[in-house]
Image (tube, rainbow, N blue to C red):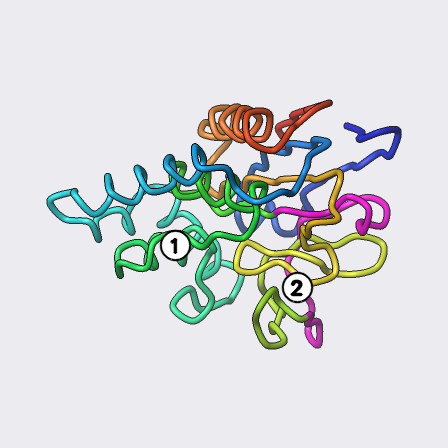
Amino acid sequence: MAVQGLPVRVTIDEALQRKCPRTALGCVTAQVEAVAAPPELLAEMRARVDEILKLPYPRGVLESGGITAIRAAYKSLGKDPARYRGSAEALLRRVIAGKGLPQINAVVDAINLVSVESRLSIGLYDVAHVEGDITFRAGHAGESYKGIGKYDLNLEDLPLFCDAAGPHGSPTSDSERTMVTAATENVLGIVISFGGSDPLAKACERMSALLAQYCGGEDILTEIVT
């Protein structure tokens, strides 16, 4: 797949695939405008939050297939899922605690909405700051980066995305290097499933629609990687 002539090739490392054989990725690239979220998008976000809070047992969403699959994958790779949660679980826990969804910009907000709906973690990257091809692999000893709004993240044994410049994203927290800002023009969103590829087409379709509707999304391309 490519954005304005810039190829972005995403692959899954064989060693990670052996430990987590049902790993699959849904990739979406688009030209966007990272503006403030419009009222219509904020309304959709509030509606999803309300739906969860009105469930007979809201915490039941934390046992959905996507959440349990990522916990099992972290254990298989040697990472404690109670200490290093997937971003989808972190968002759902925030919703259950009554804190709602964060409001960053239309692009980030749209991706968080898809994550909450699909129960799958999603990596979001500014293509301008991605260097070369991307590999999804387990972190090596000594690897770390500064997570968005976080302290340095210990990447050893954590599933992560790595380009020619090194690790830049993970299902737990992405890095500041490739984060989406108001200056971002082209994005790569990667939906991460450790439970097979079945839910990815729907999640990618939803992401594409939201980017087109609320973020001026153009030249939208999708690809499923297994």
Q: Is residue 57 left or right of residue 141?
A: left
Amino acid type for the residue under numbered disc 2? Gly
Q: Earlier in the sequence, mark 2 or mark 1?
A: 1
Q: Is residue 189 shown to the viewer in this render?
A: yes
Q: Tell me the quarter of the picture where residue 199 sits.
A: top left
Q: Are marks 2 and 1 in contact (CB under 8 Å)?
A: no
Residue at 50%, 41% in the rendered image: 193
Taking the magenta stretch, the answer to whether it contains residue 138 is: yes
Find numbered disc 2 in the image and state the secondary structure of the residue it sits on. loop
Residue lying farthest to the front in this orientation? 39
Q: Quadrant of the N terminus?
A: top right
| Nearest the eye: 108 or 119 | 108
Q: Position of residue 212 (x, y in %)?
A: 60, 25
Q: Quadrant of the C terminus?
A: top right
Q: Position of residue 68 (x, y in %)?
A: 35, 50
User: Label 1: which residue?
Assistant: 89
Find numbered disc 1 in the image and state the secondary structure of the residue it sits on. helix
